[in-house]
Amino acid sequence: MIMLPLLAGAALGAAAPTTVAALKWQQRVLLVSTDAERDPRVAAQRRILRAWKAGADERELVLVEVIGERVTGATDTAAALRRRYRLPARGFAVVLIGKDGGAKLRDERPIAAATLEETIDAMPMRRTRE
């Protein structure tokens, strides 16, 4: 999991990494997984999030990456995250996890900022805050 300034483990600004489960009711998580260290889809998802930093921050979204056996942005193990969120051992997957801990959106390609925004803004916890 890689928490780049915008993405890196904080609501693109949050505190030190913790488990994904501990973020429940606190933040939404974009979980990106791949078996390949240099998967271009991971780089593409990072670019999308960097360009959408203000939107991600406003929506309390953090990035957690599982690259091979390395996790960035959380203290979970790669195996635990793959098991819990049904991530493939090979290939690329991205999962948007809501504040309730449930998977809200899943894809095998990077998710566009507009899709993330639309999905998050339709969530009950997001609608009640506005």
Image (tube, helix red, strand yellow):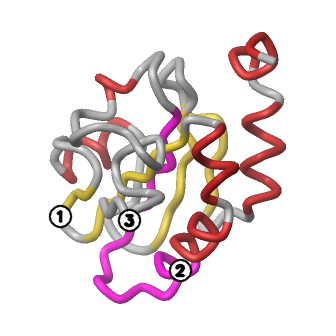
User: For the residues carrying marks 1 and 3, which lies nearer the camera in this image?
Assistant: 3
**Tag 2 residue:** 41
Numbered label attached to residue 4: 3
Marked residue nearer the N-terminal end (2 or 3): 3
Residue at left offset 36%, top offset 56%: 8
Q: Is residue 120 above or below residue 109?
A: above
From the viewer's perspective, is 93 left or right of 4? right
Q: Residues within 10 Å of mark 1 (few under 14, many from 20)?
A: some
Question: Image height check: is 39 above or below 106?
Answer: below
Location of residue 84 by image quarter:
top left
Report crowding for label 2: few under 14, some 14 to 19, many 20 or more residues within 10 A (C-alpha).
many
Quarter containing the C terminus: top right
Callout 3 amino acid = Leu
Label 1 and label 3: CA atoms lie apart by 15 Å
Q: Position of residue 100 (x, y in %)?
A: 53, 18
The magenta-colored residue range is 28-44
Picture residue at 28% right of the left edge, 69% below the top: 67
**Residue for point 74% across, 14% down:** 129
**Mark 3 Cα-neighbour bin, 10 Å: few <14, some 14–19, many ≥20:** some
Compare marks 1 and 3 and give the one earlier in the sequence: 3
Residue 70, which numbered label?
1
Disc 1 residue type? Arg
